[in-house]
């Protein structure tokens, strides 16, 4: 058993190192002329973020010719803020909300409404808490054209401020890039290599509409990666790039927000019940158990090696993605939180009312 722990964790470390070496961030470019880009921002209860998101879009070059914001029935000051900015910004337009149809999740419907109004050749979907760096739109356009891709997701730099953000937010990257070898996505067209971060999607408009757009994932709470996989199923080129130099996001700002946000995705991220339990089992057995057993082991060399390899993998990722290196030391706490929130989210979805997010309750139960 000890040999298996060490071997598996060494494989994880190898994947982390490959991604660190091979998955290089794309850099911002000078302002250039080119095809029109429509920036599309779905917003629900985003009074703290929406003005900054719009401002970062306005700081892009001339290729961004319109910024559309869909107010998804906000219950705060989101709509008045956008209305005030709209009066002084010719390229900004507020899209009034429509009733949410049966069978649709809120964000896919908002994105579908935005795309129907957009006139750009390329569609840049942004979350309201996302910030574009100057030259970001040009960098995405060049990356898409160079790679002949019609779908790009730029994985953002994740900003952290509070102690709990430093502890838990790096796990979003760790759970993905400890098992996902990024070079494979350009070599293997399989839908299983479809990956996206919903904070930033750069999509060719004509292809988006031809492949069904967000209507193809209308019932998905985890719509970003599902859209990336659907894209590959339709024989289109879809890639996830390291966008931390051109896009950043501060997803949550305190522990309650982290719990609410992680609960929203911890169970719905899995298409099948078996996948959920395999993920939970993997993280418990290989990423957490060595740390739990280490204090009680009579001969601890193998357990210490297994735990040390995990900490090294976490440290490498902290360096790669700009997180505080000391956050790696708190890995066992982060793992316990991850597993606990996953089990909590499953209980809420299968045995309770569902998970809540921004005033709505979602219940994606019934996995096969």
Image: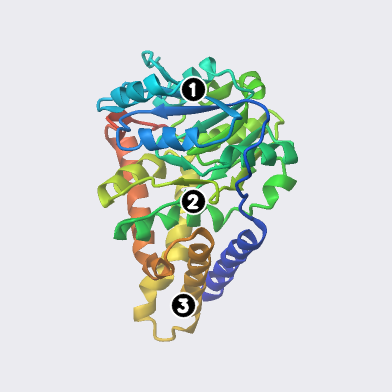
What is the quadrant of residue 177 in the picture?
Answer: bottom right
Q: Is 220 located above or below residue 172 in the figure?
A: above
Q: Is 172 located above or below residue 332 in the figure?
A: above
Of labels 2 and 1, earlier in sequence is: 1
Q: Secondary structure at mark 3?
A: helix
What is the quadrant of residue 100 in the picture?
Answer: top left
Name the mark nearer the viewer: 1 or 3: 1
- What is the distance, in whole Å, between disc 1 and disc 3 at their CAs? 59 Å
Residue 349 visible in the current orientation:
yes
- What is the distance, in whole Å, between disc 2 and disc 3 at their CAs? 33 Å
Residue annotated with mark 3: 303
Residue annotated with mark 1: 91
For label 2, the crowd category at 10 Å Cα-Cα, with few meaning under 14, some 14 to 19 and many 20 or more, is many
Q: Is 250 located above or below residue 291 in the figure?
A: above
Q: Is 280 located above or below residue 116 in the figure?
A: below
Q: Nearer the viewer, residue 287 or 54?
A: 54
Residue annotated with mark 2: 157
For label 3, the crowd category at 10 Å Cα-Cα, with few meaning under 14, some 14 to 19 and many 20 or more, is many
Q: Position of residue 80 (x, y in %)?
A: 29, 23
Of labels 1 and 3, earlier in sequence is: 1
Which residue: 61% across, 50% down?
27
Q: Secondary structure at mark 2?
A: strand
């Amino acid at each position: 058993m000890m040999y298996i722990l060490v071997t598996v964790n060494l494989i994880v470390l190898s994947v982390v190192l490959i991604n660190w070496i091979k998955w290089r961030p794309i850099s911002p470019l000078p302002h250039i002329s080119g095809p029109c880009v429509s920036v599309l921002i779905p917003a629900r209860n985003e009074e703290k973020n929406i003005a900054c998101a719009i401002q970062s879009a306005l700081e892009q070059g001339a290729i961004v010719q319109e910024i559309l914001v869909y107010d998804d029935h906000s219950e705060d000051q989101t709509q008045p803020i956008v209305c005030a900015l709209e009066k002084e910004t010719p390229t900004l337009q507020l899209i009034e909300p429509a009733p949410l149809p049966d069978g649709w999740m809120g964000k896919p419907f908002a994105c579908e409404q935005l795309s129907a109004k957009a006139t750009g050749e390329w569609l840049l979907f942004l979350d309201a808490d996302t910030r574009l760096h100057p030259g970001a739109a040009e960098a995405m356009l060049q990356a898409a054209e160079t790679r002949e891709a019609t779908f790009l997701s730029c994985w953002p730099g994740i900003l952290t401020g509070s102690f709990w953000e430093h502890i838990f937010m790096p796990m979003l990257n760790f759970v993905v890039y400890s098992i996902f070898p990024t070079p494979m996505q350009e070599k293997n067209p399989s839908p299983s290599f479809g990956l996206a971060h919903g904070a930033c999607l750069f999509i060719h408009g004509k292809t988006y509409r031809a492949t069904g757009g967000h209507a193809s994932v209308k019932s998905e709470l985890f719509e970003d990666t599902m859209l990336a996989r659907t894209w590959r199923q339709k024989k289109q080129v879809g890639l996830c790039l390291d966008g931390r130099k051109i896009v950043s996001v501060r997803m949550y700002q305190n522990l309650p927000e982290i719990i609410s946000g992680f609960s929203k995705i911890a169970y719905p991220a899995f298409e099948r019940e078996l996948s959920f339990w395999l993920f939970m089992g993997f993280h418990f057995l290989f990423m957490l158990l060595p740390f739990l057993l280490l204090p009680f082991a009579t001969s601890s060399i193998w357990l210490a090696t297994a735990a040390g390899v995990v900490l090294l993998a976490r440290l490498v990722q902290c360096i790669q993605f700009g997180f505080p290196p000391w956050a790696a030391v708190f890995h066992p706490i982060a793992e316990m939180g991850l597993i606990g929130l996953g089990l909590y989210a499953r209980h809420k979805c299968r045995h309770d009312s569902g998970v809540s997010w921004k005033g709505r309750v979602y219940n994606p139960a019934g996995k096969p």
